[in-house]
Amino acid sequence: MDPTLYNDTVTSRGFTYHYYHSPAAPGKPTLLFLHGFPSSSYDWHRQVEYFRPKGYGLIVPDCLGAGGTSKPEDLEAFRFALIARDIVEVLDAAGVTKVVGIGHDWGSIILSRMANLFSERFYGFAWIAASYIPPRTDATDLDAWIAQNQAESGNDRVGYWKHFTEDGAYKICEQNIDSFLQLLYPVRPQVWLEWFTPAWKSKEWLEANRTPGRPAWLSEEEYEVLRETLVRSGLKSQLNYYRVSVTDANVEEDSKIPKGALQVRKPALFIATSQDYVCTPRNGRANMTKYAPDATIVELDVGHWAQLEAPEQVNRALEDWMQSLPLSEN
């Protein structure tokens, strides 16, 4: 991604956001891409390469804790409603009133809060791998959640949260950065079933410093960019997305969201990933059926990182869906 197209803005909370911005051609909408963990704006480079030549505007921030954006250590800074407000201020700094929002992983949760709180700033919403997630009115009981997942599917699904929410978890991740990356971006999606979704297995993987290599869909150059970005930025701040989620820090803000705002009122797309053993299509479809019943749903036979593993299919699904958006509406 062209480094000359990155800008910095300071939000009202005092955080600096580093974001890529390519203005839209006349008649084309601007697309807002929100990444997840352990990522940066670079996760979307294949979408940027596709949509920019077609004239679409692009705003692609490094989200809080990542890349060139501020990296607070205070858990309170990671309340999702407040990050959603930060992103609106990024849009304001870029001079863009309305966008198509596209989120992946934790970016999907930030996009969900934007759908609840700032729906008027969007033509529509697209979620990849992780669907729309409604606000919570209580803290996540991680052990109960894992037990429920195990009872329903025989898969802990979020067992790695046990390690990621542990004090000092960032240290072994940073010390064994290649092992960490090759677990998060696995050679095969099924690696997660053995080493990521079961409780504490991710820590065992890192302690053994396992390095089976990069997936075929990630070039050596791309891998090195991911690696260098993480080495520069560290993981201590970004792991707070997990840590804040097992506290009640989000409860106060989420409880203020009116019940009527829980439904997605704008056009929606969900790109499900059938080989994703964390963000499962089953759970995603259930959320979309309840909160966005008119959403378009596309399921791809890929793992969690659909935008990297199957960029042609993701880009085509996004573009096909955007053809139907009422872009002239206020």
Image: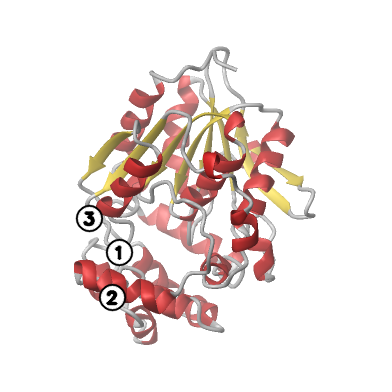
Find numbered disc 3 in the image and state the secondary structure of the residue it sits on. Answer: loop
Residue at 24% x, 41% y is 299
Q: Nearer the viewer, mark 2 or mark 1?
A: 2
**Mark number for residue 275?**
3
Viewer-closest of 58 and 278: 278
**Mark number for residue 92?**
none
Question: Which amino acid type is shown beneath numbered disc 3?
Answer: Gln
Residue 7 on image: x %, y %: 70, 41
In primary-sequence order, the first of circles 2 and 1 is 1
In primary-sequence order, the first of circles 3 and 2 is 2
Q: Nearer the viewer, mark 1 or mark 3?
A: 3
Above or below 254: residue 112: above
Residue at 34% x, 69% y is 183
Viewer-closest of 80 and 45: 80
Question: Which amino acid type is shown beneath numbered disc 1?
Answer: Pro
Find numbered disc 1 in the image and state the secondary structure of the residue it sits on. Answer: loop
Question: Which amino acid type is shown beneath numbered disc 2?
Answer: Trp
Viewer-closest of 252 and 183: 252
